[in-house]
């Protein structure tokens, strides 16, 4: 993707002019000038995605390829997940870890047959490229893709809409990925997304992105969706945002991401360990002991409890902090996620959030706050 500097030194995506023309409110995000909302407004954008289909420009994300017969084994030495056994046409959530067991970034890894396709967070893109470059062995080549945009079409009508251009997408299941021609354009299509809804992420050539996106947006069930609703959608479905709910000081076990570490990489598995911070992370898994845990929280008042709010127990002791929070448009109540002392991370336990000098009661609840509706066949 060709990145052109914006007048205030921010980068822009190939769809920047479209957002401006549509009247989007633009804000700096991860070094890019990005749409936070359109005239429809965050709440209506959120609800439209849950009810029909939302179109997101996520071209600020990093798209990478790893080439070479040892690419999977090389990447597996940097993440605590099973890459070697990832089938062709499938993708998997992965985590870059540091020697302390902390999370450098979370990413998607896909097996496209003759190479691995990676999508990394925009804010971590440069450091991820440097990390890979420093650790990949000879014979494994990193290709940074700079000539493709990335779109997400999310919502219960996404498959029906996209199938009008390419019927093959209807047969895809959650976490499937393949190269398909859509509207005459070669696309890399995964059935996945960051909203908890069924949907697709579509990598398209940058010079075709505007025409492709406008064709989708012309469908009566499709609305453009900004970063504001993207954030509330992912929070309702219990999905983390790097730099907020995940960071270099937090291990995958503390972050309640144990589901992302397959048994083959754990103690007793045939390829256990071998990744940065393995001794710390595997010890936490085996002992089931950490100082803090990521939990979901539901407010018992109408006030939103946002990032940075401190959490206290009934005796007034500080026991945690909120890392994401809003009033969920679908959940219709204040929802947050954050980290609390591990012994208090129990469903139903009541804590108190200090908001403007008041102690607001919150209850630890199971995530997601609204059901995920991925299509698994």
Image: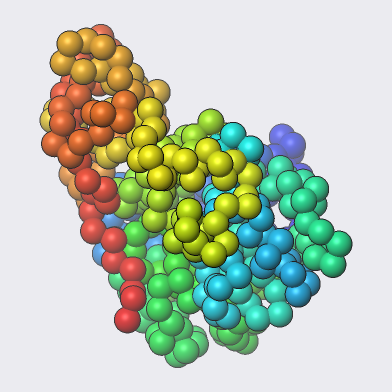
Question: Camera-side residue: 253 or 301?
Answer: 253
Q: Give the number of callouts.
A: 0
Residue 223 in view (yes/no):
no
Q: Is residue 20 left or right of residue 47?
A: right
Image quadrant in which the N terminus is located? bottom right
Quarter of the rendering containing residue 146: bottom right
Question: Camera-side residue: 24 or 153?
Answer: 153
Q: Residue at x 16, y 16 (%)?
A: 314
Q: Residue at x 72, y 67 (%)?
A: 71
Residue 196 rendering spot, x and y as whole percentages: 34, 59
How is the rendered protein coloured? Answer: rainbow
Residue 245 rendering spot, x and y as whole percentages: 44, 37
Residue 181 rendering spot, x and y as whole percentages: 60, 86
Q: Is residue 130 left or right of residue 72?
A: right
Q: Is residue 36 left or right of residue 302?
A: right
Residue 88 rendering spot, x and y as whole percentages: 58, 80
Q: Residue at x 30, y 20 (%)?
A: 319
Q: Relative to residue 54, is residue 208 depicted above or below?
A: below
Quarter of the rendering containing residue 109: bottom right
Q: Relative to residue 61, is residue 354 depicted above or below?
A: above
Q: Relative to residue 87, is residue 17 depicted above or below?
A: above
Question: Camera-side residue: 141 or 100?
Answer: 100
Image quadrant in which the C terminus is located? bottom left
Residue 295 in view (yes/no):
yes
Q: Residue at x 78, y 72 (%)?
A: 68
Residue furthest front as drawn: 268
Residue furthest right as drawn: 138
């Amino acid at each position: 993707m060709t990145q052109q500097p914006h007048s205030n030194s921010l980068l822009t995506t190939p769809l920047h002019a479209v957002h401006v023309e549509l009247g989007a409110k633009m804000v700096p995000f991860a070094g890019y000038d990005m749409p936070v909302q359109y005239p429809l407004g965050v709440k209506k954008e959120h609800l439209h995605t849950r009810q029909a289909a939302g179109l997101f420009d996520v071209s600020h994300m990093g798209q990478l390829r790893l080439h070479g017969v040892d690419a999977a084994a090389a990447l597996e030495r940097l993440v605590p997940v099973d890459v070697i056994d990832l089938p062709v046409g499938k993708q998997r959530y992965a985590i870059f870890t540091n020697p302390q067991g902390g999370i450098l970034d979370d990413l998607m890894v896909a097996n496209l047959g003759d190479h691995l396709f990676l999508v990394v967070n925009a804010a971590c893109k440069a450091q991820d490229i440097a990390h890979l470059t420093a650790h990949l062995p000879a014979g494994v080549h990193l290709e940074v893709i700079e000539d493709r945009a990335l779109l997400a079409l999310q919502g219960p009508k996404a498959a029906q809409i996209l199938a009008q251009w390419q019927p093959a997408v209807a047969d895809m299941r959650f976490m499937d990925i393949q190269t398909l021609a859509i509207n005459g354009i070669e696309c890399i299509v995964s059935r996945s997304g960051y909203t908890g809804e069924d949907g697709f992420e579509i990598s398209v050539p940058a010079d075709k992105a505007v025409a492709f996106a406008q064709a989708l947006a012309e469908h009566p069930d499709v609305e453009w969706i900004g970063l504001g609703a993207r954030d509330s959608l992912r929070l309702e479905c219990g999905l983390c945002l790097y730099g907020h709910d995940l960071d270099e000081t937090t291990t995958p076990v503390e972050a309640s991401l144990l589901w992302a570490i397959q048994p083959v990489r754990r103690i007793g598995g045939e390829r256990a360990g071998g990744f940065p911070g393995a001794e710390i992370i595997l010890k936490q898994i085996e002992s089931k002991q950490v100082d803090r845990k990521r939990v979901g929280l539901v407010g018992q008042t109408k006030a939103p409890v946002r990032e940075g709010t401190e959490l206290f127990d009934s005796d007034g002791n500080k026991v945690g902090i909120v890392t994401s929070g809003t009033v969920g448009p679908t959940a219709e109540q204040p929802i947050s996620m954050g980290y609390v002392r591990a012994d208090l991370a129990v469903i139903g336990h009541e804590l108190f959030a200090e908001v403007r000098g008041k102690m607001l009661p919150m209850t630890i609840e199971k995530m997601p706050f609204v059901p995920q509706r991925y299509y698994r066949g």
